[in-house]
Structures are given as structure tokens and as C-alpha cells.
Amino acid sequence: MELGNKRIVVVGGTGDVGSGVVVQLLEAGARVAVPVRDRGKGEQLRDQVGGDDRLELIDASLDAMTGYEQLAAALGSSGGINGAVASIGGWWQGSPLAA
């Protein structure tokens, strides 16, 4: 799939699964915006993708409404988005989540 310059937001993009999503989107030609609450993890992601300038790190902790407001303001002021991926949560290793 060619995403030629489409802007995609990846919530959870610094996690184990999310970082793989970010890599694949960049390889498909997308510009990728990742909200980060830990700038160090964001910089690790930037290193992982070889400093690709299509990766945009947005300081926004999404555990409070103010973080969503920061994210919306950052995305809106720079042209909006074309899509989103939510790669949040962790690996589940207990009993089934649903019957």
C-alpha cells in the first residue's frame, strides 16, 4: 500500500507493537505523528527509524483531557490528519478477555 505523504497519527507509537506500525507506515510513504508522554521513548523511536524526518513527535500525554487538547491543537495547526491507528494497551497473558 502506498500512502504517499498521507499524515497518520499513531497513538501508542512508542510501544512494542506501535513502533512496528510506525515503521511500516513510514515505509509505505506516510508522514507519521506520534503523541509522546516520555520524550526519551520518542527519541528512541526516532533512532529506530533512522531519524526519518517524516516522523513527528508531539508532546501530549493522553491520560488527561488536556493531552488530547494539546494533540488536537498540534495536529490542527499543521494541516490535520488522513488517518489514525490506536496501538494502546499491553499484551494480555491471563484468562480470555471475552467469552
Image (cartoon, rainbow, N blue to C red):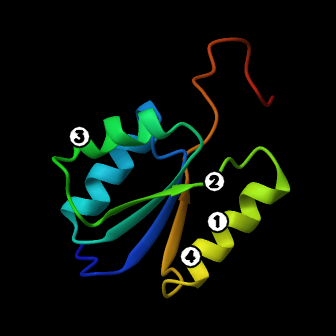
* In-image side of 80 versus 29 (left or right): right
Numbered disc 1: secondary structure = helix
Residue 73's image quarter? Answer: bottom right
The foreground one among 43 and 63 is 43
Q: Which residue is mark 4?
A: 75
| Label 1: few (<14), some (14–19) or many (≥20) C-alpha neighbours in 10 Å | many
Q: Which residue is mark 3?
A: 47
> Which amino acid lies under the numbered mark 1 shown in the image of this protein?
Leu
| Label 3: few (<14), some (14–19) or many (≥20) C-alpha neighbours in 10 Å | few
Residue 99's image quarter? Answer: top right
Give the residue displayed 79% in from the left and 31% down from the top.
Answer: 98
On the image, the x and y values in percent for residue 25 come to 31, 61
Q: Which residue is mark 1?
A: 71
**In this rendering, is residue 38 above or below 9?**
above
Mark 2 or 4, nearer chain start: 2
> Which amino acid lies under the numbered mark 4 shown in the image of this protein?
Leu
**CB-based contact (under 8 Å), mark 2 and mark 1:** yes
**In this rendering, is residue 33 above or below 98?**
below
The CA span between labels 1 and 3 is 22 Å
Q: Which mark is residue 60?
A: 2
